[in-house]
Image: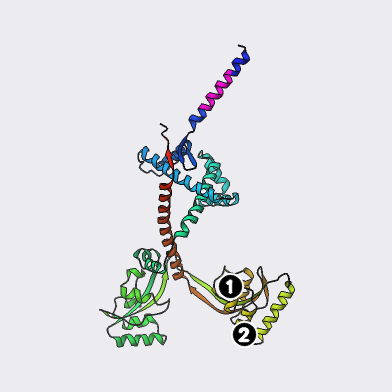
Amino acid sequence: MNINHYSFISTIFLSLNLFSAVEILDRVAVIVDDGVIMESQINKSLDNMLQRFNEQNIAQPSMNIIKDQVIETLIIEELQLQMADRAGVRISDSELNDAVSRIALNNNMELEDFIKFMLNRGSSYEDFREKVRQEMIIQRVQRARVGSEINITEQEFEAYLQTDESLVELEPELLVQQILVKSIEDANNAINRINKGEDFSLIAQQISISGDASSGGMMKWRKAIDMPKLFSEAIQDITIGDNTQPLKSGAGYHILKLVNQRGPLVEYQDQWKSRHILLTPSAIRNSEQTKNALNEIRIRIIDGEDFAELADEFSEDPGSAKKGGDLGWLGLGVLADEFEKTMIESEIGEISEVFETQFGYHFLEVLGKRNHDMTKENIENQAYQMLYSRKYDEELENTLRVMRAEAFVEIKDLD
């Protein structure tokens, strides 16, 4: 046998040995429906979990328990990724880049510094990006699968707003003054003095028999839930600066004034109530013709014709035309910049000049302006998000449990 033949045989054996080594390094560990989980995925997830235990100084369960948890997590992820693949869910590179940049900013780093930080820790930036992409895909699948199943009734929402959890976490602290007198006659006399413009604090100092009379009846900052029920129910029906009618208790008759409120959801917003008429250039009416037509409508209103009727007849804003052009009460940051500028600069009752936005040509009339207490709306929005999140988590857990139970899963014994 010549030397070339021996060389050829050696090459074959070398190739076989290398191939065997590669197979030993990574093997199919779990079959999940149409996909697989590799042993390397399990090992990498195990390493990450152990690293988190060490970094957070948390007592570590047994390796068997940790491994079972890792495998179950990877099975659920794989099932959701398969579902996403069947539904054609994709995350674009630009979406992924934005998400990674936000993660870097949340860690108080620029993206370049974040990449260096990961490399210094021995982590792969490309692996990290792929993990983020998978998590975004899974979140999108979950929202589509679970979000449509969640229904919050009005009765359920109102009941949640009254729970101790909601009241303690969301309600603002209130600053309240009180006047306490013995008889209803004294209470009514105090109300008459308040209605005539006398200072509440001065009246409290003069006639109140409560322990806080010397401070003008000023009570400590408290949430409504921490007040007597008589007080909390009365206070919820008044606004800052207003007072209640006399409230009878075992101590006498109370008059309460809501002085102020504070908390993360307390907000006061400048708002404008306005109406407008919009005309949009088209193939049969160019920009100049559109502006001229709108000016003619404006002149008709100035001459005495009804704004609402002309808005209903001519305005091309589908959201407001049938409401007489009325946009309701709106704060800043909602409307187009030029519209807001014109609205802010207009006097109440004044018909503005014609102006242009990206939607076409408008003129408007400001019907009113106010500084509106947004606290109640903020509380309701936050409460809805809390209730939705709770129901979402419950529904997601049920969905994943059913998905896991219905899946074909074979865990290989690789030991």
Hey, which quadrant is residue 211 in on the image?
bottom left
Question: Residue sitting at 46 percent across and 69 percent down?
Answer: 377
Question: Residue sitting at 29 percent across and 78 percent down?
Answer: 210
Question: Residue sitting at 71 percent across and 74 percent down?
Answer: 290
Q: Which stretch did the figure color magenta?
A: 9-20
Judged from the image, the secondary structure of the residue bearing numbered disc 1 is loop
Q: Is residue 107 visible?
A: no
Q: Is residue 270 visible?
A: yes
Identified by mark 1, the residue type is Gly
Q: Nearer the viewer, residue 346 or 260?
A: 346
User: What's the distance in space between the residues labelled 2 and 1, CA to CA?
Assistant: 19 Å
Q: Position of residue 400 (x, y in %)?
A: 43, 50
Which residue is identified by label 2?
306
Which residue is identified by label 1?
319
Q: Is residue 3 above or below residue 105?
A: above
- Mark 2 vs 1, N-terminal side: 2
Crowd around label 2: few <14 · some 14–19 · many ≥20 (10 Å) = few
Farthest residue, direction top: 1
Judged from the image, the secondary structure of the residue bearing numbered disc 2 is loop
Q: Is residue 75 left or right of residue 61?
A: right
**Dots 2 and 1: beta carbons under 8 Å?**
no
Hey, which quadrant is residue 368 in on the image?
bottom right
Q: Position of residue 406 (x, y in %)?
A: 42, 47
* Tally of marks: 2
Q: Is residue 350 above or below residue 94?
A: below
Question: Is residue 239 one of those drawn in magenta?
Answer: no
